[in-house]
Amino acid sequence: MGHLNYLPNYLYSIAPRKYMAYMLHNFKKIPQIQTLSPEQIFAIEVVAHILPFKTNNYVVEQLIDWNNVPDDPMFILNFPQKNMLSPEHFDRMAGLISENADPVVIRDTAHEIRMELNPQPDGQMERNRPIHKGKPIRGMQHKYRETVLFFPSQGQTCHAYCTFCFRWPQFLGIDELRFAMKEADVLQDYLSAHQEVTDVLFTGGDPMVMKADTLSVYLDAILDGDLPHVKNIRIGTKALSYWPYRFLSDGDADTLMAVFRKVIRSGRHLALMAHFNHPHELQTEAAEKAIHRLRQVGVEIRCQSPLLAHINDDPDVWSAMWKEQVRQGCIPYYMFIARDTGAQHYFGVPLHRAWKIYRQAYQKVSGLSRTVRGPAMSADPGKIQILGVNEVDGRKVFALRFLQGRKKDWVCRPFYAEYNENALWLDDLTPAFGKEAFFFEAS
């Protein structure tokens, strides 16, 4: 089973911008699209000029319930919706498209709008990029002491795009907004110089779009280097959801399993950080078989997702997803808060409601599912968990703590913020009890 002919993956590797143009020109050929109204199709076209759009036949045929469109969560997860842009931004782009404006004008306008959507949130470009031998390394992030994120250049696309993705600038072909790196020897050299690093996370995009031999080159840089301090290798991927055939029937699927076995035989822990946003993604025959095969090899699968309005903002959805993950031998890991970028206004869930959803879902599962942590914000200072809403001296406050921080002393440290029923992100919160700043702001 391969990608739909009208959505050729190879075009992206040649030129991301040309791929996006091709995608916009050809998505109407998807047979199921004919069930949509002309207004809905036009809205997809308008939004996709600004936010990246990519799909494949597995998503279209096996994940989306076209009888429930436009409300189907898998449809919303993969196809741009009008309200993912502000009315001002939508009308501005819609007007240009309707007028058949010069493509250069459309391109420049799209870029201007993107720059207003906080394309690189939480210090990713400015604060997370490491310095090695006096030079910044473009394809890595080193925010937390023990963990390095590595962005292999061949893995900076995905089998299909999530409409909420906080790394949407990776897919636009805009060099100044992308993290990417080819040099495996630079990774090896950096890790050798940083003995504190125990974990390397391969991320993107999706490293699972790479050929097994290409991935092996990067992994061998760790396995064959003198790096005994690197104990854990993680691979962030949506492939189990959007293209499980990567682990089953792709031409090099067996080679990929051999690569994974090599990592495990080296004595290192290998974890696939799987992105599942809805229980339905776990319930296809291909997904279940792929999970089973990975577990047979010895790969651990940890599952995470943001909490998303219109897709999974329901405790019953989360409890069902966690139960299914455990049934298939996966580990529920994180419930995140939708990041402050892109279409956050569309997907964001107020923090007080996020905590209630997490708590209600948590109450519905056994201890095997209670490995999950959340709801958590991957914000500039670190991963911050909402512990709950408390009342102190008659005032409602948020209780929070750091699960991870830029400074290790912040970890597990509780703190309080004034209750704000409209808060979607850390920046919407103010310190409780009359304090002028949170403790980490004064550090």
Image (cartoon, grey):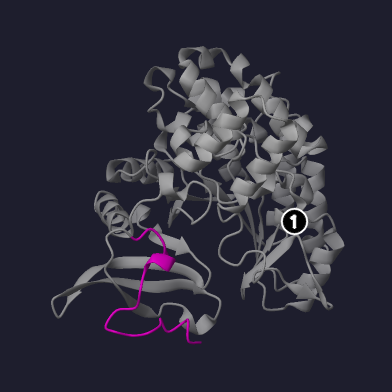
Residue numbers of the magenta segment? 423-443
**Residue 339, placed above or below residue 318:** below
Q: Is residue 213 left or right of residue 29?
A: right
Residue linked to disc 1: 176
| Residue 225 visible in the snapshot | no
- Quadrant in the rendering for residue 67: top left
Amino acid beneath label 1: Glu
Determine the main secondary structure of the stretch shown in magenta.
loop
**Image point (62%, 52%), residue name:** 115
Query: Which element type, helix, strand or loop, lies under badge 1?
Result: helix
**Image point (62%, 25%), residue name:** 99
- Quadrant in the rendering for residue 387: bottom left
From the top left corner, tell me how far across and down residue 344 is, in percent.
Answer: 46, 50
Q: Is residue 200 left or right of residue 389?
A: right
Q: Furthest residue to the left?
A: 394
Q: Is residue 272 left or right of residue 192?
A: left
| Residue 156 visible in the snapshot | yes
From the top left corner, tell me how far across and down residue 310 is, in percent.
Answer: 37, 38
**Residue 18, placed above or below residue 227:** above
Q: Does the magenta portion include 297?
A: no
From the top left corner, tell me how far across and down residue 418 is, in percent.
Answer: 28, 73
From the top left corner, tell me how far across and down residue 18 is, in percent.
Answer: 77, 32
**Residue 8, placed above or below residue 106:** above
